[in-house]
Image (cartoon, coloured by chain):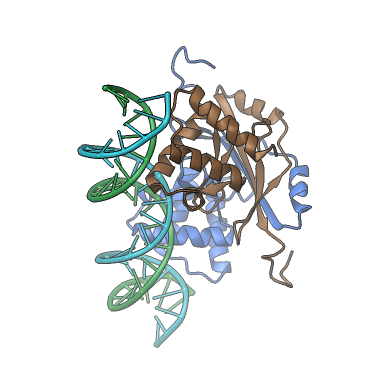
Chain colours: A brown, B blue, C green, D cyan
Amino acid sequence: MGDPHKAEKIALEALRGAGMRVTRPRRWIIAALARLAIPASSREIHDALEGGCDPVTVYRCLTEFERLGLVHRHEFGDGGTRYQLVDPDGGHAHYIVCRRCQHAERIHACPSPELESTAAGRGYSQITHTLEFFGICPECRDPGETQ
Amino acid sequence: MGDPHKAEKIALEALRGAGMRVTRPRRWIIAALARLAIPASSREIHDALEGGCDPVTVYRCLTEFERLGLVHRHEFGDGGTRYQLVDPDGGHAHYIVCRRCQHAERIHACPSPELESTAAGRGYSQITHTLEFFGICPECRDPGETQ
DNA sequence: CTGGATGCAAAGTTTTTGCACTTGA
DNA sequence: TCAAGTGCAAAAACTTTGCATCCAG
């Protein structure tokens, strides 16, 4: 993954470029996302902020950031929504998530672009995809549990 | 996809096989899932029941059914959780979902099994995956909108 | 200055929990 | 019969909305 600091700088520039104000909460949220570097819930992001701000502001900012394409949204099968700063180097991330502890680990796998073209054939535009893997991580596996 | 009626029968047998009771709400829920045939929210499932039952029962049953592997859970990027009866013919489903109207359409694309083995290399067990596509469907696309 | 952004309060949605009653096996 | 399962009520968790105030540009 690219330099987190770089991702942070680019996100701030993108904010300015979109005519949006670079406020203190927004800087904190972007910094927290860059520091966490892994998909985090609104709650986790709020807890990781350098300064204090209202949880509602975190929701609002994340929604805006997603609209601008600065963050990606992930759903890891537990009903919660997680956000992650987009990698400025263009590669998009997929994860393997532990079904027990919810720990997410980046994985280098991406379906061949051929898959997206299958989707495009249906007349859909602006196609994106999500791909996540789920399993039981080595730490969470009970000893003697069936593989 | 396989015969929905078959999927329904198999699910009921699986319930008995697991030593669980085949109650009226459970039959209704499984029937509704078979009839809907596409990932549906707890609310949609409840609305589609032949008879009346408490919404809480729908939640509890779906959670149990998921644990037994009778239904699969889907998250379509809107924060909601959807459930679908597992196809007894083994093939698992992926969808393309409209970001505007949330309509889900089954799509015949699956990442090469090679991808799951990439995940297995990390020491995870019981690996599964989700893969969903998102786009704007032809009906929702504004005329003249940029592709 | 001044409109976009925030904080606070309140409400909406979805999901979970506790407990007495019901019912399928 | 009788424990698993349900209904009802209440709470918890998560997210959105409205509005007065604040501050980045």
The residue closer to the viewer here, B114 or A29, is A29
Please state if B103 lies on the left or on the right of A125 as rendered: left
**What residue is rendered at 77% in x and 47% in y?**
B118
**What residue is rendered at 49% in x and 50% in y?**
A80
| In this view, A75 is above or below B68 | above
Q: Residue furthest top?
A: B144
Image-quadrant location for residue D12: bottom left
- Residue B144 in picture, x, y percent from top left: 46, 12
Please state if A11 lies on the left or on the right of B31 as rendered: right
The residue closer to the viewer here, C6 or C23, is C6
- Residue A123 in picture, x, y percent from top left: 56, 21
The residue closer to the viewer here, A3 or B94, is A3
Say if residue B2 shows up in the picture.
no
Quadrant (top left/top right/bottom left/bottom right) for the C terminus of chain B: top right
- Residue B58 in picture, x, y percent from top left: 41, 57
| In this view, A111 is above or below B118 | above
**What residue is rendered at 64% in x and 31% in y?**
A88
Say if residue A140 shows up in the picture.
yes
